[in-house]
Image: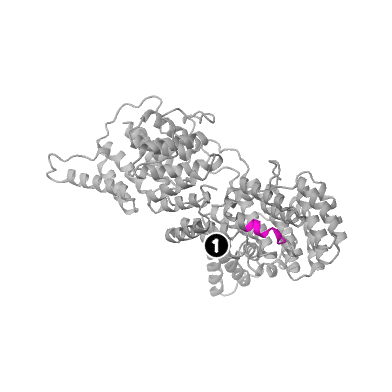
Amino acid sequence: MLSSRFWRLALLGAVVPLLGIIPNRETRAVAPVSIPHGPAGTPTVTQSLATNVLVATVAASEGDNAEAARTFTRAAQLAPSYRPFVERAFLYSILAGSPDAARLARQQPPGVVPELVMGNAAAVASDWAGALSHYEKAPDDPIMRIVRPLLRAWALQGMGRTDDALVALAAAQADHLLGGYYTLHAALIAEMGGQVMRADTLYRRALDMSGGDLFTTRVLTHWLYRQGKAAQARDMIAAKIAAMAALEPARPALVAALGRPVVTSPQQGMAQAYGLLALLMDQQNNAETPPPKPGEDHPAHDHDITTLRSTEQMMLRLSLMLDPANTEARILLSALFHAEDENQQAIDVLAEVSPNDPMAVVIRAEEGELDMALGHRAEAERIIRGLLRDAPADRTLWCDMGDILLGQGKWREALSAYTRALALSGTLEGDDWRVLFGQSIAYDRVGDWKHAKAGLMQALRMAPNEAELLNDLGYSMVEHGDDPATAQDYLRRALALSPDDGQIRDSVGWVELRLGHVGEGLVLLERAAEQLPQDPAINYHLGVAYWVSGRRLEAVNAWQDAAQFHPDPPDQRKIAAALAYATSQAAAHPPAHAVAPADLRITPSPSPAASVSASATTSRVASPPASGSVPAVGEAASPNPQPNPDTKATAPDGSGPAGDKKDGAHK
């Protein structure tokens, strides 16, 4: 998936702190809202009000901003004197991109967001004086200090006052972090105002100090192209693609669009101002944050991060209000929806992109991955195969195809796709470990554990502290009977890195059980099943632990649960075998020579002091080793990782069973 990380502004690693000054912290209000007493009206009206508030609250909690906006609006109409309803209706209308936002803004008390929305509505109507008035009236805060110079300048340019617009940006151009971005906008305004020589001077200055976002690259390459420096423009695009491999499919279209201006109206310039805010919020959102304290299930910053994401979404909606064709804003917004598992909304946002947009081919690839996340696997495969017909040498598309085929259980085809992607990769670096990971799943599924292990070891050397790699390597080694002590070490490290991950806890518990440490394994498996009660593999493992512990009825119950949760065929066979054996043993005259399945023949053994205990998720888990300290187990030859057909495969993005993608693997 084209994660928002790829659209971040390059600010020398700096993060502009925006977290504490978000205009309204109710942008993700999901707590129940009290029903006002008093003059609500008749019982029928009160009942209707309660219904709308309930529907709105549920819709908000599920990320359905459009429904939340509609039902909070109805609640506000039924109880017009109760301010929280109209406030929530306003905020959710922005998040939903509803045209009602401008009308509702006029009903809000003075504030940053209402003034921005009303200013945008005036700008869309080319009422530049009205837009300027609203932007000036917005209260001062760090967000407005960033965006106000751009909004003022573009409103003045809309009024034909180019000189005043450039004066409005003069001081901002000296900013040590964002000066290049303000200078770029000043160049665009000067050019739009017919001041060509002044624009050229500003473009040259911006070229030396600008950030690394795609918008900046496209504006500067267009200017270079018009200066007769087409080769330099193409080199700049090539450098951007080298740093952002997901853009590779769009290379021909980006080069072909060099002669096309990027900004042709003040509204588009204003839209990019909100895009700047979204990029800065995205950068802060993706900045490193302190790990949770031991035993802390919900880190203290979670609420603030959720609020920041919602405010970033709001800024993107304000951008699209001004310029619906802002493709970068749509990609960022789609990524935010995808991060919340709201994949249909993510697709809907991208569906508005014109097929003539230079980024259209990238958008199509994104839609394919989102279809995959929604379980529309045939449609996803159709989209990516169509793109590959036009770009057969695109490694990113081959990675996507590998993920899609893996999710469909087409192991050999997936292996071929990943191998093709790796052949086109050159030197492996960065997130390329995910390609090795996906290829190794495919190797293991076709029965080639040697290459699967070698590839997973190679991936682990590239990303030695990736919990999903450690988990799958350790789990698979045990399933293959390969060095259980080292496998146990990998799994301890995975759990130390992700102490709240139920899948990893299941892996550790299962390995402890397989090693005969029944007590430790049972405790971990019970906790994993509490976290993921509908996971068939975890319930199967828990049933085995109960059986070996002599708790036969609980074992049968766990296996019956596992059977109803749609297990994969390998797990289904194991569950059926366990249930059949349990049934035979419960008979009045059990078969004399009935052979228990291999998993049920575990022999309990004394637990070594180093084994993972019941408190394995906290302080007794070994700390993760320093980067690069992976034990040398086996040789790392070719590319590749993960479990055999009887193990639980995780998607290359670490999001769950192979194919159930929640984030982009290779981009």
Q: Is residue 10 above or below residue 485?
A: below
| Type of the residue with mark 1 | Asp
Residue furthest toward the top? 609
- Residue 217 in view: yes
Q: Position of residue 504 (x, y in %)?
A: 43, 40
- Residue 523 in view: no
Q: Position of residue 517 (x, y in %)?
A: 33, 31
- Left or right position of 189 against 253: right
- Is 255 magenta? The answer is yes
Q: How many marks?
A: 1
Q: Is residue 290 above or below residue 53?
A: above
Please tell me in which quadrant of the rendered image residue 167 appears: bottom right
- Is 576 magenta? The answer is no
- Left or right position of 551 against 457: left
Q: Position of residue 93 (x, y in %)?
A: 63, 65
Residue neighbourhood size for the residue with mark 1, other residues' Cα within 10 Å, grouped as few (<14), some (14–19), many (≥20): some
Q: Position of residue 222 (x, y in %)?
A: 72, 56
Q: Residue at x 30, y 51 (%)?
A: 563
**Colour mapping used in the image:** one colour
Q: Secondary structure at mark 1?
A: loop
Please tell me in which quadrant of the rendered image residue 362 appears: bottom right
Q: Which residues are magenta?
A: 253-261
Q: Is residue 610 above or below residue 585?
A: above
**Viewer-proximal residue, 307 or 249?**
249
- Circle 1 sits on which residue? 64
